[in-house]
Amino acid sequence: MDEDEYLEIVNENGETIGHAQRSEIHGNPSLIHKVVHVLVFNKTGEILLQKRSQNKDVAPGKWDTSVGGHVEAGEDLLRSCKREMQEELGITESEPEYLYSYIHRNSYESELVNTYRCVYDGEITYNRSEIQEIRFWGTREIEEAMGQRIFSDNFEDEYRKYLSKFLTKQ
């Protein structure tokens, strides 16, 4: 965790309106910053979730989106997505597909989330300083655990967005 990480402050349309250190943005939900999420699926359709380290300042010890991270100031979204996939899970040979963007707000922060997905069945070497555990979850298992406080509020929001955009259209 780099509290001195320099991030763009954006408006709800994703337009840059300023810059600040991560330590200034976290804890101030009036400042929106960009993040990327990647939903990593295996070939059977299960989704990989990561259990966040107890050392994280946001949702410690909670199950969360496969990959998630800040977009550095001036960084392209796809480049940020691939960087985070490598840093968190060691995935380098998968091409993520852009899905959608949305604003996620809670009492701690406001994020412009840019969500991608990929299918990956290769080796995963996760970053043990950021991630406590990883595993694939089925849809039914996720739905039974929703609202039980084992997931981050961000993941529950992400999962509902994904379901509304993709699973209801099948």
Image (cartoon, rainbow, N blue to C red):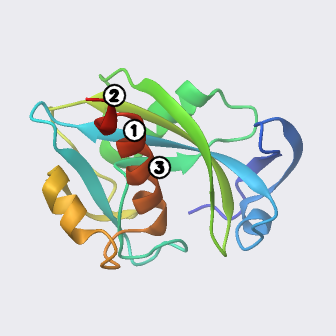
* Residue at image coords 15%, 32%: 122
Q: Which residue is mark 1?
A: 85
Determine which quarter of the picture holds residue 22. Answer: bottom right
Which amino acid type is marked by label 1?
A: Met
Which amino acid type is marked by label 2?
A: Thr
Crowd rating for badge 1 (residues with CA inside 10 Å; few <14, some 14–19, many 20+):
many
Q: Which residue is mark 3?
A: 68
Helix, strand or loop status at disc 2:
loop
Crowd rating for badge 3 (residues with CA inside 10 Å; few <14, some 14–19, many 20+):
many
Determine which quarter of the picture holds residue 131. Answer: bottom left
Image coords of residue 84 (percent x, y): 46, 41
* Residue at image coords 81%, 64%: 30
Which amino acid type is marked by label 3?
A: Gly
Spot the residue most to the right: 17
Q: Earlier in the sequence, mark 2 or mark 1?
A: 1
Cβ–Cβ below 8 Å for labels 2 and 3? no
Image coords of residue 102 (percent x, y): 60, 44
Tell which of 132 and 149 is nearer to you.
149
Q: Which residue is mark 2?
A: 92
* Residue 28 is at least partly visible in this image: yes
Tell me how far mark 2 sits from mark 3, CA to CA: 15 Å
User: In the image, is residue 107 above or below residue 32?
Assistant: below
Image coords of residue 56 (percent x, y): 48, 72
Helix, strand or loop status at disc 1:
helix
Cβ–Cβ below 8 Å for labels 1 and 3? no
Helix, strand or loop status at disc 3:
strand
Tell which of 47 and 167 is nearer to you.
167
Image coords of residue 14 (percent x, y): 76, 37
Q: Earlier in the sequence, mark 1 or mark 3?
A: 3
From the viewer's perspective, tell me whether residue 37 is left or right of residue 106: left
* Residue at image coords 77%, 44%: 12
Tell me how far mark 1 sits from mark 3, CA to CA: 8 Å
